[in-house]
Image (spheres, grey):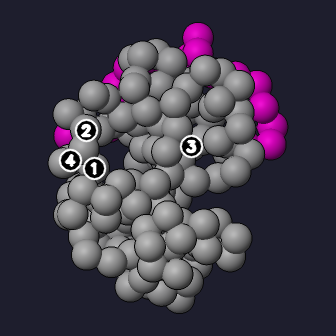
């Protein structure tokens, strides 16, 4: 399976020290250039770790004909959606709520960082989600408390 990843999901998984899960669950992870550029700016959270992880994962595919015009989304999100369409990816790994809705409207299967972590918990790759969620809460990552509670409940950790 091929997955395209967006910035926020990659940052969240990096904060949790679980980028490796992506390689366990997918045959190939790719990102568009805009996502890579967003993630690898100097002094950006997790930039050095993500730069190393994304080595050889940046797509050079021409995505221009797949770009949609939505001024509410950032360049990385728009390119990630376009790359999914261009390579016919199995999943888009994305956390932003509006970008997720846009992807679904465009018939793209989605998951997010919490979905990856929950799947890993169910498969026994990680023992508990609570430490990851606490790390995310202490970071700049914004996740609704309602979503956190739903995920913890599904993981039998509430």
The N terminus is located in which quarter?
Answer: top left
Residue 68 spot, x, y in % from top left: 70, 22
What element does badge 3 sit on?
Answer: helix
Q: Earlier in the sequence, mark 1 or mark 3?
A: 1
Q: Quadrant of residue 32?
A: top left
Q: Position of residue 147 (x, y in %)?
A: 64, 66
Observer-nearest of 149 and 17? 149
The magenta-colored residue range is: 56-73
Q: Crowdedness of circle 4 by 10 Å Cα count: few (<14), some, many (20+)?
A: few
Please tell me how crowded label 3 is: few (under 14), some (14-19), or many (20+) other residues with Cα within 10 Å: many
Q: Position of residue 58 (x, y in %)?
A: 32, 37
Q: Spatial distance from mark 3 to mark 4, Cα to Cα?
A: 21 Å
Viewer-nearest of labels 1 and 3? Answer: 1
Q: Circle 4 is placed at which residue position?
A: 23
Residue drawn at 35 percent across, 54 percent down = 119
Is disc 2 in contact with disc 1, using a CB cutoff of under 8 Å? yes
Q: Are marks 4 and 1 in contact (CB under 8 Å)?
A: yes
Q: Is residue 100 visible?
A: yes
Q: Residues within 10 Å of mark 2 (few under 14, many from 20)?
A: some
Give whichever of 155, 62 is nearer the camera. 155
Please tell me which of labels 3 and 2 falls first in the chain: 2
Q: Which residue is mark 3?
A: 76
> Any mark on residue 22, and which?
1
Q: Secondary structure at mark 1?
A: helix
Secondary structure at badge 2 equals loop
Give residue 84's mark: none
Q: What's the residue at 65%, 21% (across, down)?
A: 106
Q: Disc 4 and disc 1: Cα gap in Å?
A: 4 Å
Q: Are marks 2 and 4 in contact (CB under 8 Å)?
A: yes
């Amino acid at each position: 399976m091929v997955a395209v990843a967006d910035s926020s999901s990659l940052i969240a998984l990096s904060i949790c020290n679980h980028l490796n899960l992506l390689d366990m669950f997918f045959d190939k992870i790719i990102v568009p250039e805009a996502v890579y550029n967003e993630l690898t700016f100097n002094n950006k959270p997790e930039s050095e770790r993500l730069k190393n992880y994304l080595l050889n994962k940046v797509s050079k595919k021409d995505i221009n004909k797949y770009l949609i015009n939505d001024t509410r989304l950032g360049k990385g999100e728009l390119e990630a959606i376009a790359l999914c369409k261009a390579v016919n990816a199995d999943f888009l790994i994305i956390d932003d709520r509006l970008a997720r809705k846009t992807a679904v409207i465009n018939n793209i299967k989605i998951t997010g960082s919490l979905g990856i972590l929950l799947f890993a918990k169910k498969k026994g790759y990680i023992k508990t989600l609570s430490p990851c969620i606490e790390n995310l809460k202490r970071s700049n990552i914004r996740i609704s408390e309602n979503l956190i509670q739903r995920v913890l409940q599904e993981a039998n950790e509430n």
